[in-house]
Structure formats: C-alpha cells, structure tokens
Amino acid sequence: MDLPSNDRIFPLKPGGDVCHVYEDHPYFNRVVLRFKRKVKLQPMPPPLVTKRTFLALGLHAPVRNAMAAIQEGWRREGWPLALPHPEDAHLTLVFLGATTPPQVEQVIPAMEAVGARHGPFSMPVGGGGFFGPQRTPRVVWVGIPATPALSVLQQDLAGVVAGLGIPLEDRAFHPHLTLARVRDRLPPGALTSMMASINNTRFVEVPVDRVLFMNSQLNGSGPRYTIMHETLLKG
C-alpha cells in the first residue's frame, strides 16, 4: 500500500523515539495511537563518561629546570620541534587509557595496597635517546635507568591494574622523559647536537616517595594534566 507524503511526526515519549501519523489514513492513526498508549519506551541511558588516565611519578624542580634549559637552546635554533612544558613532565608507569568512574574507584585502593609494599627511593636521570629512525626521529628524550626499585614498583602497579580487568598496552616499560616531538625533518647535524646537549647536562636524582593517579585532557593547546589521587610509598 502506498502511503501519502503529507505525514506528521510526533514523539512516543518526550525525548524518545518518534512515529509517523498519516493524516489521510485514520486506520493507521488508530493503530499508532493505540501503540502509543500501551507501549512504554525506556529512555536511552546517558553516555558513559570516561577519563584518560595513567599512573606516574612526578619530578622535582631541579630536573624540570634542567629540561627547560635544554629546550630553550633548541628553541633558539629554530628547529621544527614541539616542546612540552617542563612543569608538566612526569614519568608514566602504567597507562590505563579510557577509564570509567567505577574503575577509578577500584584503582585507588589498589594503588594504596601497592604503596604499602614499597618504600621511597631515588631515581637517577640522564642520557639522551630518541624514538624512530635516525634520519627521521619522532621523539627525543632523556633516559631514566630501570633500577630494581623502579622496575619492581612499575610491575606491581601494572599487575594490580590488570587484575582489575583494565587492558594495558602490550609493550615493554621504557622509562624516559620526553623533551621534544619532531614535527618535520631536522637539518643535518641537529640530532647529534641535541644528543650532545642532553648528555652534557648533569641531572640530579629524583626523590620518589609517591605515585600519582593522573587524568589527561587533550585539547588544541596540548594535554592538560590533573592529579586525581596520590599514594605515598610507605613500605
């Protein structure tokens, strides 16, 4: 049966689905109205809000200042680099990604359990490196040796997060602090100069006495970080 085009649309429930009523077909109108009275449509649940989260170690001022001094020298060279703000620098231990509010509530007591098993320690910093081919590097960083204290803490945190059913990245832990992201091809000799500026900088050790549960909000001006919880290392 062909239906006319002069139909009206009305909601079966405020905010819910809609149904067509055909003005020239009373039979169809009666069926639709009867359906409207008998059927109770459930409203759509609101979208689940997630946060982009990770577990990390913070840095103290001497290391951040040393990173800023290196970046300032690169900035004067005019190389095609994106330089993250040193005050936002941190060492990511476990990246959780999109995390729901119930998962956030589960992670915090798991962090506290890990903090009770580990004590404070010092974290050395130093040595330059990069990700990607030497001719076209993507990221330039200063390294952090994977000392036993750091490695065991990272493995413990990753284990408890995985035990909560949160999927983790399938890649090895490579501790580093990002100094620059390369936007375009570097001029000849630039990467060698960058490695020299990192290796010639004396970094002091970082005192580690807590783990941070952080949220990263991405926007046009770069990520914005918020600390949601701190767990002291008191083992």
Image (cartoon, grey):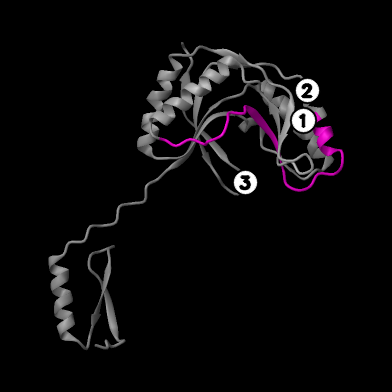
Whether residue 178 appears in magenta in the rendering, the answer is yes
Q: Nearer the viewer, residue 47 or 173?
A: 173
* Residue 209, position as x, y percentages in the image: 53, 16
Answer left or right for 172 relative to 128. left
Q: In which quadrant of the rendered view does residue 2 lie? A: bottom left
Badge 1 local density, few (<14 within 10 Å), some, or many (20+)? some
- Give the SS element for disc 2: loop
Q: In which quadrant of the rendered view does residue 142 lie? A: top right
Name the N-terminal-most of marks 1 and 3.
1
Gap between marks 1 and 3 measured at Cα: 21 Å
* Residue shown at 84% from the left, 33% from the top: 193
Name the N-terminal-most of marks 3 and 2.
2
Q: Nearer the viewer, residue 80 or 114?
A: 114
Q: In which quadrant of the rendered view does residue 143 lie? A: top right
Gap between marks 3 and 2 measured at Cα: 28 Å
- Give the SS element for disc 1: helix
Circle 2 is placed at which residue position? 201
Asked if marks 1 and 2 touch (Cβ < 8 Å), the reply is: yes
* Residue shown at 56% from the left, 39% from the top: 224
Circle 3 is placed at which residue position? 221
| Vertical arrangement, residue 4 with respect to residue 204, above or below | below
Circle 1 is placed at which residue position? 70
| Vertical arrangement, residue 50 with respect to residue 229, above or below | below
Q: Which stretch appears magenta?
A: 166-195
Specify the amino acid type for callout 1: Ile
Asked if marks 1 and 3 touch (Cβ < 8 Å), the reply is: no
